[in-house]
Amino acid sequence: MIDIDQKCRRTNLSLPSCVERIKWWILFRWKIVKITFLSLFYNTHLYPNDKLSGDYVFDTLIQPAFWFVDNFTKILGPVFVIVVTFLTFCAVFVAYWVGLPWYLENKSNYLTYSIVIFGHYLLLNVVFHYWKALTTSPGAPPSSPLEVVVSVCKKCISPKPPRTHHCSVCNTCVLKMDHHCPWLNNCVGFYNHRHFFLYMVFMVVGCFYLMVCGAEIAYQEFIGNWGLENNTTMDIANQPRYYTEEGGFYVFSKRSLIFFETFMTSGCFFSLGGLTLWHAKLIHAGQTSIEAHINRSETQRLAELGKIYKNPYNFTPLYNWYLFLGLVSGRGWLSVFLPSSHPPVGDGLTWDTIYSCRVEWTYGYSPKQS
Ligand SMILES: [Zn+2]
Ligand SMILES: [Zn+2]
């Protein structure tokens, strides 16, 4: 107050007028806070046709949650990437540490080396596609004028080409956006969609491979020896344990490593397997995760008007896969089974549709024009 009093004297203002100003300033700030708070929940479409819209209430109430999730995802993105890399490394480490010696001891060398070679083929693909999905930008609309524009992004205030959507985590428009993947700390869109999908496929196959190859080891460890006379494997005291040279520092028992491997590979196989199937279903129908929602509501809307909606990017399942995997202009299946960084078909700005398609199919057929 002394400060304010001195300032008032310096500026030739009386104390009551200063108090008035401070009061006005506090009230003004309070109003801003109030408006900001209310704006989080306010929506002019709450009462379309003088009736409270449940959808809008939900949509409006969920906005702060979206804001939180967006920011949370952005901050935790690098942590998720480190977790994925670390867990993959651990799964491979256990395969080497426990699986390889067991195979060398119990199976033929020929079988052991074959399993190791195929395992490395899968690992190479997993690492390659994860790295590409992580480091490849999904693509954003350029600042130069666009040939085809379908709408304007309200957040970027810039034109949007077909199939482009705004990502609130990356805070930019993304070409053929599928979704923002926290495990990649990147958006999945036009340029990295194939790498994202193939990463999941090779990861699921890799987990299944480890489950199959490790099944006998896990069986022996946890079940197999119950009925046997020489029950040494189940004898915890005889389990190999790992100590440092100084002695006394217990790291992990073989059993805990086998349990970890079983838990990780089966958990990843079922959860990522479900996600892979879901994405395969979308690709099969020529749509992205976002378009699946749009296509569903458009189908419903047009059905109410007695019309039939047709997804213009659905070239029938086989051709949807060819397009997605880039099997065009002479490129064959080797580019799917081996690591390949070929770019997707087109530029992500203008799109071939079932009504106008200029794609040169590798496998020589033309999609049904309907
Ligand atoms: Zn945008
Ligand atoms: Zn994003």
Image (spheres, helix red, strand yellow):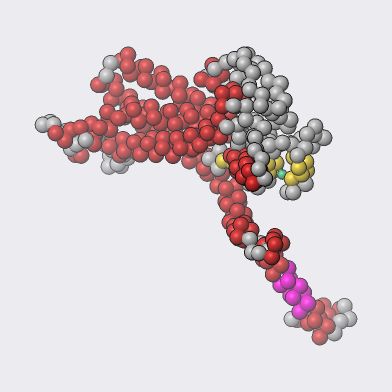
- State which image quarter holds ligand 1: top right
Q: Is residue 237 above or below residue 18?
A: above
Single out the residue that lies furthest toward the right.
12
Q: Which sits in the foreground, 208 or 360?
A: 360
Nearer to me, 294 or 368:
368
Number of labelled discs? Answer: 0
Residue 122 in the image, given as x and y percentages of width and height: 45, 24
Q: Nearer the viewer, residue 326 or 44?
A: 44
Q: Position of residue 83 (x, y in %)?
A: 48, 41
Q: Would residue 340 be found to the left or right of residue 358 on screen?
A: left
The residue at 72%/36% (across/down) is: 162
Which of the 4 image quarters holds residue 58?
Answer: bottom right
The magenta segment: 22-32
Q: Is residue 28 magenta?
A: yes
Residue at 49%, 24% in the rendered image: 124
SS majority, magenta: helix
Do we see residue 292 in this rendering?
yes
Residue located at (54% from left, 16% from top) = 334
Residue 86 x, y percent position in the rendering = 46, 37
Q: Position of residue 229 (x, y in %)?
A: 10, 31
Nearer the observer, 161 or 314: 314
- For the N terminus, the image quarter is bottom right
Q: Quadrant of residue 24?
A: bottom right
Q: Quadrant of the C terminus?
A: top right
Q: Is residue 79 above or below residue 13?
A: above
Is 289 one of the magenta-colored residues?
no
Tell me if 85 is positioned left or right of 96 in this view: right
Q: Residue at x 28, y 35 (%)?
A: 254
